[in-house]
Amino acid sequence: MDRRVILKKRSTPATAGQELIVTCPGGAEEVLADELREVGFADVRAETGAVRARRTGEAGIPEANRLLRTASRVLMPVAAGPADDYDAAYAVVRSAPWDTLLPLDRTFAISATARSAEIRDHRFLAMRAKDAIVDRQRERLQGKRSSVERHSPDVPVVVFAGDGRVEVSLDTSGAPLHERGYRTEHGEAPLRETVAAMMLRAAGWPRQRLLVDPFCGAGTIAIEAALIAGGRVPGDLGRRYAYQRWSWIGGVGAGVGDGGAGAADRTAGASAGIRIVAADVDPAMVATARRNAERAGVADWIEFSVSDAAATLETVGGLRTPGAGDTRRGGGGVVVTNPPYGERLAPADLDAVYGRVGGAMKQALPGWEVWMILGEAAPARRLGLAPDRRLPVFNGGLAAQVCHYQIRERTRR
Ligand SMILES: C[S@@+](CC[C@H](N)C(=O)[O-])C[C@H]1O[C@@H](n2cnc3c(N)ncnc32)[C@H](O)[C@@H]1O
């Protein structure tokens, strides 16, 4: 049967049209907007660090939380209005129906961001917002109020003040969505799973069918690549979401819910002939990456090895991918990687690593594409390659750039 027919039968017109705010790492907005459209959201608009979209009969809160690979949190707005001081912010927060949104026996916590000229103190904003919520409850619920629980609240509340407005939302995700559940171990400089997914999407993976990460660390890029290539839903690795506790809020779990794999298929690539190579010079990191891949259920997809990055590139450059000849664009595969930028290496050693890796790319990988995320301190010039695209991105709040290099084909004599 046609999947769309099944999805339509499950649709919930009562919640269709409601706006959601989906946050993401800065720089991933356009990629997230594309994902939202593919999953079936309507009226998708990218902002800074977030994308707004409307729920439809086939795409709601469960789909946004489970299917989007570059989303950080899915917020459900409950009040918004102009506010150029803390009293006005208090009034906006108090205008939401907290007596029905937040039962007395449920806990809450507030996360506030203060970015307007007049409202700059996020702690004071959070305190005023907390007062507004409990005052509204006391007024409507015989003087009673809910308790604050900072670490695992039933209802996480997000308050944002910026450009003379305050917007109040419920955070339907709870723990941020980059915490997929598989990466319980990592090294010193892990890459956010959402940023890895953004790089892979920018690279057009799995079109190339062969992917290499020669600085794999905890394996994030390789594991995300395997999840994408296999059409695996990122939210189906055992984690829970805040909205799943909200039985008192009508329609919050409405959508495809249990059957979102259909929507995932639309973002997945063909899995035939896929090869993913992940290597690191540190044997402990390779062991960690392998265990993370096992937890994600994709260890069989990835070839792990302990190797210096330049040697890894030289090795893969000498191989051919069976069956990939027709679909490769200009070469054998793609490198997607997050090289070190000075966590443990002395500057001279770091320069040498970048020099060797750039040389290996030019020698061994003619026609390949390379996508690298480079921190501000990375000695990118040592690669000896000129990027033809740079995408600014924030990895866990740190400014970085995703650079694209097209390695030139060797001239035949
Ligand atoms: C920024 S971390 C990569 C983090 C990874 N993306 C993750 O999510 O965990 C850089 C990695 O490069 C490795 N490394 C440093 N020098 C190397 C070299 N010459 N060859 C291969 N790996 C190297 C380090 O052991 C470290 O795990």
Image: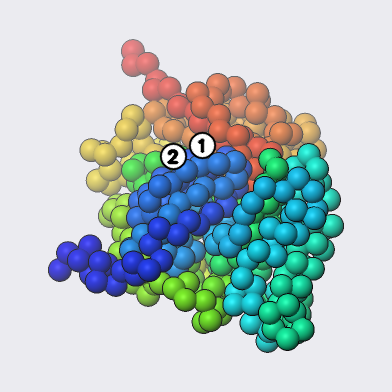
The residue type indicated by label 2 comes to: Ala
Label drawn at residue 203? 2
Q: Residue at x 73, y 77 (%)?
A: 139
Q: Residue at x 77, y 84 (%)?
A: 143
Chain-order first, disc 2 or disc 1? 2
How far is disc 2 from disc 1 in space, using C-alphas? 7 Å
Q: Residues within 10 Å of mark 2 (few under 14, many from 20)?
A: some
Find disc 1 in the rendering and name its residue. Answer: 371
Residue 257 position within the rendered picture, expressed as x and y whole percent measured from the top left: 39, 72
| Residue farthest toward the top in the current orientation of the protein | 413
Q: Dot 2 lies on which element?
A: helix
Type of amino acid under label 1: Trp
User: What color scheme is it?
Assistant: rainbow
- Depth check: 325 or 189 in front? 189
- Give the quadrant of the N terminus: bottom left
The total number of labels drawn is 2
Where does the image place residue 199, in percent across and percent down from the top left? 51, 43
The one of 209 and 104 positioned closer to us in this rendering = 104
The answer to whether residue 352 is above or below residue 51 is: above
